[in-house]
């Protein structure tokens, strides 16, 4: 695309994530002295809400074919809008939908795409965005740029805060009619996953366990501890994938959930890179492990070397006593 | 007869990768190379489809010559033929350049009903090559498959999404990306390993695929890596030792004092 691309665009089919993208997009747009544009596809229509969270403009496509996410129609819609309006940057929410949409769209527009970018910085001098992503099992952080435009990145949930809604903000809502073809696939049935109401992504405290817990019945100790610290229970990959003690949605790691609690307890988790990548954004990490050489101790704020079967009950006890002080 | 192409990528066993904190380099020496796990699932699924419906499985990788090892494993798992796309010109390819090379090979092979690959690779987790290849080849994509059922030229796929599970129907030819949940890949037997050594493996370079230097590798890449640094793992690393109940009390107190934990 030619050099006259301008504007920071954001899109996510999840409204909450769209507001988070606006939060980050706002300062990018200010840094690059350009406008912040939110794209709203199908229903529900988010116009004024997106403006109140920071958008200068909302492109509103109301074609009912866009009411449910389908990669074909959403790629068509965004490609058609991008070709017409030439955005400089396009941030897409890194949901599973977003992660299949972004590369397909990028290929159609013959541009680069950085998936699951964890940091974005404006390079004002060169008028571009530096995008960071983690690679090689969390060992390397790469700073990437796109050689062509729009510069596309997908952004995980919960990474950037949304700006508080400000109803007095003014912006422009533009109805658009992107060119959309027929979808190639047909959804037959969509069912919500049976997650037991536990949302790791929103939890301020997570108590997570790994192979150090020897029997399924012993998970009760972890649950009691979680209750004492008002936390949510998570686990490492083998617990969910190999042993099936917790649902797959509860495992934390590179290929599982990525979490960002205030406090993360890793109980009997050795700390493979796979797991560490999922907990990187935790503010404080506490590790309990019987092996003093466990890699988790290199990656924690507080480490307790000991048998979790002794340490956890002691922590529950200490928690109970803390109430008296 | 279902003709399938499976894309495989050879990766370092990520669990064994370490960082040399002094040199700030990734230590890859002595780290085993394996077929990326979800690609292995894709391969297993293709072999199962062949066993049920009859057909042919072609494994393809774009990689340095060492990846022959991965292709031999693919053949031992049940692939019928393998193609190694290798050329120094391919070095430094990003997702777009990689998809372009794979697309050239797929186009040259012409005759296929289904392309299968992992939803992501174990080393980069970029989720890009499948959708990009589907776009270049103008194929429908069905991602995150946990079950695939073929019925003539129709395919019904169970998909694992963010908060939902979806059943979707599509037509062949198409590209399907799979998740680990879809199956348990078989271990090759001694017999199948021996049989694999007799199966055809072909090497294609850029010229065989009609690709020029400007389209592939670093030159063809749309993404440029400006910097690659060791992930900072800076944590306080305060180790608490001694009597268990004293340690526990000290820890809880510290967490409450710094405002990380609320007293009960």
Image (cartoon, rainbow, N blue to C red):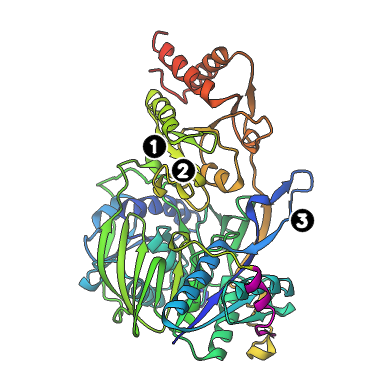
Residue A72 in percent (x, y) is at: 35, 75
Alpha carbons under labels 1 and 2: distance apart: 8 Å
Circle number at residue B30: 3
Local crowd size for mark 3, using a 10 Å CA cut-off: few (<14), some (14–19), many (≥20): few
The nearer-to-camera label among 3 and 1 is: 3
Dot 1 lies on which element? loop
Q: Who is closer to the viewer here, A41 or A185? A: A185
Front residue of this view, candidates A56 and B128:
B128
Residue located farthest toward the top when viewing the structure as drawn: A324
User: Answer yes or no: do the residues labelled 2 and 3 have beta carbons within 8 Å?
Assistant: no
Q: Are marks 1 and 2 in contact (CB under 8 Å)?
A: yes
Q: Position of residue A36 (x, y in %)?
A: 39, 59
Q: CA distance from mark 2 to mark 3?
A: 32 Å
Measure the C-alpha gap from mark 3 to mark 1: 39 Å
Query: Which quadrant of the figure has residue B95?
Result: bottom right
Q: Chain of mark 2?
A: A
**For mark 2, what is the residue?**
A259
- Identify the residue shown where x is 72% and y is 56%: B31
Same chain under badges 1 and 2? The reply is yes
Which residue position is annotated with label 1? A203
Which image quadrant for residue A300? top right
Secondary structure of residue under mark 3: loop
Q: Residues within 10 Å of mark 1 (few under 14, many from 20)?
A: some
* Magenta span: B190-205
* Pointer 1 or 2: first along the chain: 1
Q: Examine the rendering and report whether any part of residue A10 can be seen.
A: no
């Amino acid at each position: 695309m030619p050099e006259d691309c301008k504007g920071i665009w954001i899109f996510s089919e999840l409204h909450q994530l769209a507001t988070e993208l606006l939060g980050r997009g706002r300062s990018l747009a200010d840094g690059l002295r350009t406008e912040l544009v939110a794209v709203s596809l199908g229903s529900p229509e988010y116009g004024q809400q997106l403006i109140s969270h920071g958008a200068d403009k909302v492109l509103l496509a109301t074609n009912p074919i866009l009411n449910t996410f389908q990669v074909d129609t959403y790629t068509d819609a965004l490609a058609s809008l991008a070709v017409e309006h030439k955005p400089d940057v396009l941030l897409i929410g890194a949901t599973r939908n977003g992660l299949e949409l972004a590369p397909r769209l990028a290929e159609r527009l013959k541009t680069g795409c950085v998936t699951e970018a964890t940091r974005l910085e404006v390079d004002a001098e060169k008028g571009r965005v530096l995008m960071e992503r983690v690679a090689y099992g969390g060992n390397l952080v790469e700073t990437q740029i796109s050689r062509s435009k729009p510069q596309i990145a997908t952004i995980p949930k919960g990474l950037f805060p949304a700006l508080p809604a400000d109803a007095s903000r003014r912006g422009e809502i533009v109805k658009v009619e992107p060119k959309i073809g027929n979808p190639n696939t047909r959804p037959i049935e969509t069912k919500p996953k049976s997650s037991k109401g536990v949302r790791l992504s929103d939890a301020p405290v997570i108590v997570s366990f790994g192979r150090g817990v020897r029997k399924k019945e012993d998970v009760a100790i972890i649950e009691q501890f979680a209750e004492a610290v008002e936390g949510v229970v998570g686990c490492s990959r083998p617990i969910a994938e190999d042993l099936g003690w917790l649902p797959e949605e509860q495992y934390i790691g590179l290929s599982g959930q990525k979490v960002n609690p205030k406090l993360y307890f890793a109980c009997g988790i050795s700390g493979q890179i796979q797991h560490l990548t999922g907990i990187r954004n935790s503010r404080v990490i506490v590790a309990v492990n019987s092996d003093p050489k466990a890699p988790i101790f290199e990656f924690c704020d507080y480490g307790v070397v000991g048998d979790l079967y002794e340490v956890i009950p002691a922590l529950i006890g200490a928690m109970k006593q803390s109430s008296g002080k | 007869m279902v003709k399938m192409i499976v894309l495989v990528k050879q990766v370092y066993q990520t669990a064994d990768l370490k960082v040399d904190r002094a040199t700030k380099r990734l230590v890859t020496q002595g780290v085993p190379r394996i077929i990326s796990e979800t690609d292995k699932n894709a391969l297993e699924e293709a072999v199962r489809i062949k066993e049920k419906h009859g057909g042919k499985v072609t494994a393809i990788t774009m990689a340095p010559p060492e990846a022959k090892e991965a292709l031999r494993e693919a053949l031992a798992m049940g692939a019928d033929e393998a193609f190694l796309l290798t050329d120094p010109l391919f070095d430094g390819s990003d997702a777009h350049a990689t998809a372009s090379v794979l697309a050239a090979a797929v186009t040259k092979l012409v005759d296929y009903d289904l392309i299968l690959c992992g939803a992501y690779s174990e080393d980069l987790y970029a989720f890009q090559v499948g959708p990009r290849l589907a776009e270049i080849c103008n194929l429908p994509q069905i991602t995150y498959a946990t079950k695939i059922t073929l019925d003539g030229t129709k395919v019904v796929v169970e998909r694992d999404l963010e908060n939902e599970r979806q059943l979707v129907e599509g037509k062949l030819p198409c590209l399907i990306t799979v998740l680990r949940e879809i199956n348990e890949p078989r271990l090759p037997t001694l017999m199948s390993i021996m049989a694999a050594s007799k199966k055809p493996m072909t090497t294609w370079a850029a010229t065989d695929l009609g690709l020029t230097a400007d389209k592939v590798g670093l030159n063809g890449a749309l993404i440029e890596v400006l910097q690659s640094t060791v992930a900072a793992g800076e944590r306080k690393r305060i180790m608490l030792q001694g009597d268990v109940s004293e340690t526990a009390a000290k820890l809880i107190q510290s967490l409450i004092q710094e405002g990380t934990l609320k007293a009960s």
